[in-house]
Amino acid sequence: MRIVVVGHGMVGHRFVEVLARDASAVSLETPIDVTVLCEEHLPAYDRVQLTSYFSGKTADDLSLVAPNFFEDSGFKLHLGKGATEVDRAAKTVTTTSGEKIPYDKLVLATGSFPFVPPLPGKDRQDCLVYRTIEDLEAMKVSAKRSKVGVVVGGGLLGLEAAKALRDLGLETHVVEFAPRLMAVQIDDGAGKVLRNKIAALGVGIHLGKNTTEIVDGETCRHRMNFADGSHLETDMILFSAGIRPRDELARQAGLDVGPRGGIAIGNECLTNDPDVYAIGECALWEGRIYGLVAPGYQMAETAAHSIIAHEKKKEFVGADMSTKLKLMGVDVASIGDAHGATAGAQSFVYVDEPNEIYKKLVVSADGKKLLGAVLIGDVEAYGGLLQLMLNNMDLPDNAQALILPSFDGSAKPALGADALPMTATICSCNNVSKGEICDAVAKGCMDYDAIKSGTKAATSCGGCAALVKQVMNAELEKMGVEVKKDICEHFAYSRQELFHLCKVGEIKSFDALLDKHGNGQHDGCDICKPTAASIFASLWNEHVLKKPLAGLQDTNDYYMANLQKDGTYSVVPRMAGGEVTPDGLIAVGSVAKKYKLYTKVTGGQRIDLFGARLEQLPLIWKELIDAGFESGHAYGKSLRTVKSCVGSTWCRYGMLDSVGFAIQLENRYRGLRSPHKIKFAVSGCTRECAEAQSKDVGVIATENGWNLYVCGNGGMKPRHAELLASDLDSETLIKYVDRFLMFYVKTADRLQRTSVWRDNMEGGLDYLKDVVINDSLGLAAELEAQMQYVVDTFQCEWKTAVNDPEILKRFQPFVNSNQPDDNIVFVEERGQIRPATPAEKAGRITIVEMA
């Protein structure tokens, strides 16, 4: 059977993959002869991950074609060759080179093209679209001569395109015709939160703007004039205003198309010609064009099954359009009927404005079923909610608890992997069910990579990764197999295991760790490298920028300062216990005044100095060091602050010297590297002015000594600390804190707060008490000794840096220039500086009206 596939995008390639897989599994009456036409010069690649092209990924990295796929399958792929004509009577396809290829079955996977509004000026130079790798190359060329870029379209693709512009270093704006971003997927409340979060990243958001023309600009290359009389100037314009199906070949061949385009298909993905199929974004099913890859993959499987007809056919009966993405660093998820359009639908809405979190549940009229959801800022619940909706499962009592934070530490209603039916779709992109994952485990896929390779689950958007692991782990545990907790693909170990390997083997470099215990074929990733850096720091306490440790650090550790949204840094000197002398205050004020820094008192009793340029950091550190300060380690996963009240020294209610003890604790544990940041507080009495019960380590004075609380935290998911021990003297308390902290450092997972570590601890608080107080594991002496080593080897990282000429070379804005970064612009507000908004950056853009 001769099969011709027109189009080798993601969906076209999925079709030939399924065809190759299924054809090899059955006995076909006649062998298949497959020819694939691809008008691009690259074989199928992952368009969902296009933005990663600007962060270092190559076309090879994005390729979807396994090595030797076409050689092994015997299929023929013609790159740079499209189709110009289909002769249905003769059953031939004419290619762009004039060749006529005969077919028995024809599959049209021609995809779509970006819609460009028909407005004057749309074809000017540097007016581009965002669709292919060739488009990305054109963007790179244009970006080199541009400072400002605008994306027309605030949907999913538009925001992805905006990220691409930011990655290219351009001042970025999004212009959207609708009154909110992602108008199809989210509601007004979510749109407001999303807009605020993206605007906070420095992206100009212009909603409700109808562009009427593009003409010459005064300060930039182009000027976009809007229907309301306002305008926006820019050097580059990216159109991402939706897609239109590529159906011209079908029209030429006389196939049925929809009134607004799209090749009409039925449930088998057949057109009105029984030998012609259409799949993906070119296909119109029941009046609908699907613009996501997951439905296209389902169509590809349906068409392949229909052609081979070796088993019960999989019909395409529509697709779920739920989606979970990280758009420009902002978590966004939309499930099912997000707008509550179903008759009788009711909603629960949770809004946390300070933390910019929005969650909405849409439930049925009787409150028993989930119809849809919207999540912005915190999408942890996505997997469970999606399964509730897809499988029409009953909601738990008090369904609103699914989106509400747990302030009392109680567990949320959870949907475990075991509760899902075998038919539950776990990976929507690749249409992989729970049953298929369980089958793969039963056939020998014993780790996450094997499951991905064997089923293709979690190989596209990755939104189902957590649930895939849960299903896999649940199946492995049923089989009595120990569940692996690999930190990443480069190390088949948990963080705790890596810690022990480094300690026992006295491993002090990443290369040595990789050679001895990792996959030597790779260079590591942004998960295992910072984890190794944290472990080395906890064990050996060497300077974070010592070679070769520097290359392992996250950005903030690498520059020993906190990177802010405008590209400047903030500097936080240590003020142990929140205590600072008048001379110290004057010194900090002098530095702030000299370098024109924005100053603010933090919640941890520090003074934060914002707006420092990279090349200013060593100069600022030097002046602070000369005034008696040292690094406050505000940039690291380390001890941040020990907050205190004034205690018995000044307060009439104070029982003990909380300031003095806070200073003692802070000086002891300063700079301690750990799986996550750590905060302490010491209150001088039970009135708790230092809020010690919201900290990782909280100390409260009583009539009989100190009470020690552990594993609390504030932030996004607040948790009260728990009482570990009562009425302690200072020496005993420090001994317990030594043990507690080092036990946490050694056993917690990567980026695991003490509260989460405690919640996952089998035996809970009683077990922790046994380890720390009763020394049930016989580790107390070792834990104390390890902590004492860290204490004895402390160094101020700033001071070491300013005295090392090699380290100082890192602190210049450009490799080939010492000039300051002119993209950093401030304006004055309330007597201090703040980052300029895009509209305020004089000389680059003129904005008459901000939406």
Image (cartoon, rainbow, N blue to C red):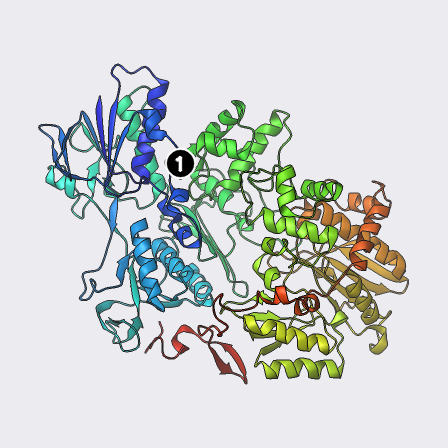
Q: How many marks?
A: 1
Q: Residue at x 49, y 67 (%)?
A: 814
Is residue 140 visible from the viewing direction of this image? yes
Q: Would you name the residue on which mark 1 appears?
A: 430
Residue 220: image quadrant is bottom left
Instruction: Look at the image and tell me in which quarter the C terminus lies.
Output: bottom left
Residue 502: image quadrant is top right
Instruction: Tell which of 464 and 108 is nearer to you.
Output: 108
Q: Position of residue 687 (x, y in %)?
A: 78, 68
Indicate left or right for 363 with 791 as reference: left
Q: Where is residue 494 in the image (x, y as percent from the top left)?
A: 65, 40
198, above or below 19, in the image: below
Amino acid bearing label 1: Asn
Q: Position of residue 534 (x, y in %)?
A: 66, 52
Q: Which residue is drawn at 29% across and 51% down?
A: 134
Instruction: Tell which of 812 and 608 is nearer to you.
Output: 812
Instruction: Look at the image and tell me in which quarter the N terminus lies.
Output: top left
Instruction: Tell which of 492 and 467 is nearer to you.
Output: 492
Is residue 423 visible from the viewing direction of this image? no
At numbered mark 1, what does the secondary structure look like: helix, strand or loop?
A: loop
Instruction: Tell which of 302 and 49 is nearer to you.
Output: 49
- Residue farthest to the left? 89
Q: Residue at x 19, y 66 (%)?
A: 121
The residue carrying pointer 1 sits among few (fewer than 14), some (14 to 19) or many (20 or more) residues within 10 Å by Cα, namely many
Q: Position of residue 792 (x, y in %)?
A: 81, 59
Indicate left or right for 303 with 819 as reference: left
Residue 294: image quadrant is top left
